[in-house]
Amino acid sequence: MSWFADILGNWKTEKTDEYLSFGRFSDAYKNKEKYERWDASIDLFRSGKTISSYLAFLDYLDHGQGNVSYSQVGDSLEFTIIQGSKKITGMVGKDYVRAECKVAQMIQSELGYMRFLAEKNYELKYSRYSLDEHDCVCLVFDSFLLDCSPFKLYYALKEVALSADKLDDILVEEFEKGLTPVDNDHITELSADLKAAKRTYLRSTLKDTLDYYDQYESDSTQSPGGLSYVLLAAGYKIDYLTQPEAYSLEAVERIQRLYYSRDDLDMVTKNRQIVSEYRRILQRDDAMIEREFYQSIFTFGITKPIGSYRLTEIFTQDWKNFLWYRKHDLPHIAIAIADYIVGYSLFNFAPAQPIRELLHLYYEIMERDYLVATHAATDFWKEDEINQRAVRRELKTIEDRYEDQIMGFALDARLVDCSSRLAFAGSFLQMIDQIKIS
């Protein structure tokens, strides 16, 4: 099987729509047939059968939700790829391939966004920003067929798709007098009630986080590092559970870059900058926040796929901190550290599918009120207590789902302590750490 499958895994599941629809889209979860189409694409290209190679390539990208369409006429091929709010159109001719994505429609020329896009061109490896004959800001890639293997085409189209989808809303909002949305009629609006629920959850999560920060910033028992966990966990949580686009998404990404940047800023200063980012989100009016919530489909993922995945191998120090705060009777921060571990994992990685399902289950239990109300999630609580029997039943269901795919796969539900939120958070992550996936 292809090296892609070796890296990304090859899973099948009966629960894909229930949890893979949250958080950042990942193209890591493909079945065996899709990887075979990738292998076929490589072999056909090496044999000089370029159109057939690209047809197999497009089949590889297609995950069955209308994200890819194409038509062939003789030796030419036209295709369309959907990525979030953007649509990439491409054409393959006798000796060339070209792909274009309309990012925004120019109303009037402004030095601000022209300079911004010129600077962005230096960050691109395969594509470039340009203006078309209809005064649309476009992201364009073109190449001779001879040197455009499926590998090059994949990374070029991914660059176009991710860059355009990330920047379109931001550009239109920042330069609203000069630019207007274009070519986004394929997105699906969410119901007013769901938008309002997402906005309410985002606001309440950030407000509660800032209230805690304001209360304990000067408290000697609450170290700056502990408050950092509280702040970061909130950002990852709203990103995964509400999936905002544009400003709020970019703010969470800026916060992560800030926190992990190697500069001379101390933790106190970084925390204050993170708080400033959250306050700016909360200052936006309801309509602007709700505009960031919509339903679309994706082709390319951002998160990094990883195979064997053990939480404490990546977060050894974080786990030590969890144990320290739990020992010193600071449950709020201890739970925030567990939230952070789960949120960071889902924000940055595409873990093996069983692990991702378990991480989602963590949120289902810990964020029960929001998910049950808005997404008809299973209620794993019984009055004010976590229903241990229901949790164990769900773990057995997950174990049964994957045991025939992973040799020796087992979940030790006995490790999970449902006596309190703190006990559950720690014991659940410990259970995940015992899983061996190779």
Image (cartoon, grey):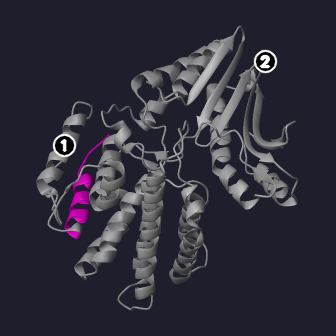
Q: How many numbered circles are shown?
A: 2
Does the magenta stretch mainly form a helix, a strand or a loop?
Answer: helix
Residue at position x 13%, y 56% in the image: 388
Residue 407 visible in rendering: no
Residue at the outermost front position = 192
Q: Quadrant of residue 21?
A: top left
Quadrant of the snapshot with the C terminus:
top left
Position of residue 70 in the picture relative to residue 231 (left or right): right
Magenta stretch: give its range. Answer: 422-438
Position of residue 134 in the picture relative to residue 6 (left or right): right
Q: Measure the alpha-carbon separation of dots 2 and 1.
A: 53 Å
Kind of element beneath mark 2: loop
Pointer 2 residue: 95
Image location (x, y in percent) of residue 173: 70, 58
Q: Quadrant of residue 396?
A: top left
What amino acid type is highlighted by mark number 2?
Asp
- Residue 340 counted in the magenta span: no
Q: Residues within 10 Å of mark 1 (few under 14, many from 20)?
A: some
Kind of element beneath mark 1: loop
Tell me if label 2 and label 1 are in contact, CB under 8 Å.
no
What amino acid type is highlighted by mark number 1?
Ala
Between disc 2 and disc 1, whose residue precedes?
A: 2
Residue at position x 19%, y 40% in the image: 397
* Closer to us: 1 or 78: 78
The disc label shown at residue 250, or none: none
Quadrant of the snapshot with the N terminus:
top left
Q: Is residue 235 above or below residue 1?
A: below
Q: Is residue 337 above or below residue 63?
A: below
Residue at position x 32%, y 65% in the image: 338
Pointer 1 residue: 410
Image location (x, y in percent) of residue 333: 34, 76
